[in-house]
Amino acid sequence: MITGRILVIDDEEFITRTLKQHLEKVGHEVLTASSGEQAVEIYKSEMMDVVLLDLNMPGIGGIEALQAIRSISSDAVVIIITAHGDIVTAVSAIKSGAYDFIEKPFELDRMSVVIKKAMETVNLKREVNYFREEKYDTYSFKNIIGKSRAMQEVKDLAMKVAASDANTILIQGESGTGKSLLARAIHYDSPRAAEPFVEVTCTAIPEALIESELFGHEKGAFTDAKSAKKGLFEVASGGTIYLDEIGDIKMSTQAKLLRALEERTFKRVGGLKDIKVNVRIIATTNKKDLESAVRDGSFRADLYYRLKVIPIAILPLRERQKDIIPLALHHISRFNREFRKNVKGISGGAEKLLINYPWYGNARELRNVIERVCILEDTDLIYPEHLPTEIIKHVDTYSDNGKSVELPGGGLSLKDVERELIVQAVQKADGNQTKAAKLLDISRDALRYKMQKFGLL
């Protein structure tokens, strides 16, 4: 039996006493009130799960008491008790927010069934609120970590966008920079937070199905369409649809997507009726330059500029070195709770290694490294030896390698020296990048990054 706290309100003492005795026998805690005024005062000070409220009482009437209780808590579950034949008033109470009504004289077993259903509703609401608050906490802007100026600017812009009526946002950045987290923060910090957040990974849906997935289909639209189906745009109506890797959508779908963006209207596959939705679109791409896709004809120019109403660009982590340690500490705190560890921080030597590592996997790679350390190591501080081999062995060419180089009186360009050393290493290794990287005492990935930087690839 589902038990809870119940407030019984009736000016007839016999009814309140009878209900109290019956409900306490089945495990409920029961408080009673003989007037609407008294009931409202009790409800203000006590956390009640269900309210049984008689409509006909002296003083403030049942409808007024209902409205007062609902003003205290919009989630209040109120069951109306009404005299036989007073259905019109009971219906009015339902319209004012009552959960259900039951007529006098009532059977106690019937009352128990109604209360049981009400308690199930109360517990369901609590679960929904719990998961909603958990999502708000998980995806709030407080989890967008960054002390760098670039990240602060991104966060400030995203918070303004979240609170605005902007309904088209384009987030660009390398894989692992946190585009998905930022998209969710925008949704859950917006007036749309209580509505759906629907994620679409465009690369994961076959070309033949993406139009049907986005816009739905009518029965018989194609061979396997045994019944009509809502698309994800309809499912997300009122909330946010998150289109991850928008640059990979095929051209034929791009045209329909453009119409949906501009008019908030579309047709299901095989349908003739226009369907209108109110939805915010957040699109992301890890393409370095979506404009190049426009130039080579693989992405529609009109769709690109429609998406780019509010552009947000997240720099890679290697260009935001100030963010590396704060982000690592944030993950340590998280994994301490998750794995019941007590890692207090990072040693100076380990900090230096983390800061100088290029992080080609960006924030995702850093999170994975910290998670691995927290799982495998039993330590108060993270030291260099706890870090993966590739981080320990990585030596940036800017760092001191123990060799002395005399600076000419007229000075020289460090950039030119670095480029020349890379060219010489590749030549000595006969073009073998792995061998060239070993000559420079850096990883192959670091070598390729620098070769790209200097136009050597």
Image: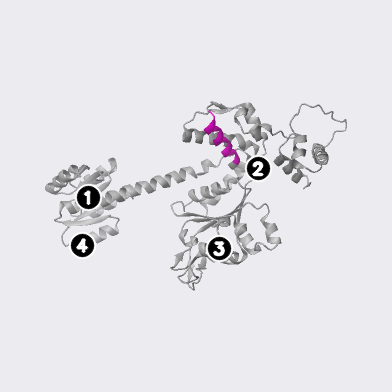
Q: Residue 432 carries which label?
A: none
Asked if disc 3 and disc 1 are in contact, CB closer than 8 Å, the reply is no
Residue placed furthest toward the right: 409
Residue 308 visible here = no
Where does residue 199 sit, x and y in percent of width and height? Answer: 51, 54
Give the mark, 3 or 1, whose residue is nearer the N terminus. Answer: 1
Q: Quadrant of the N terminus?
A: top left
Q: Which amino acid does label 4 sit on?
A: Ile
Q: What residue type is labelled 3?
A: Leu
Find disc 2 in the rendering and name its residue.
Answer: 360
One can see residue 446 in this view: yes
Return the residue nearer the eye: 125 or 200: 200
| Residue 136, percent from left and from top | 46, 45
Q: Do the residues labelled 1 and 2 touch (CB within 8 Å)?
A: no
Residue 125 on the magenta span: no
Return the residue at label 3: 261
First in sequence: mark 4 vs mark 2: 4
- Residue pointed to by mark 4: 87
Who comes first in sequence, dot 4 or dot 3? 4
Element class at badge 2: loop
Report which residue position mark 1 lands on.
Answer: 52
What is the three-letter code of the residue carrying label 2?
Tyr
Label 3 vs label 2: CA separation? 33 Å
Indicate whether 294 appears above or below 178.
below
Circle 3: element type: helix
Magenta residues (range): 365-377
Query: Residue 358, located in which quarter of the rendered image?
Result: top right
- Tag 3 and tag 2, C-beta contact below 8 Å: no
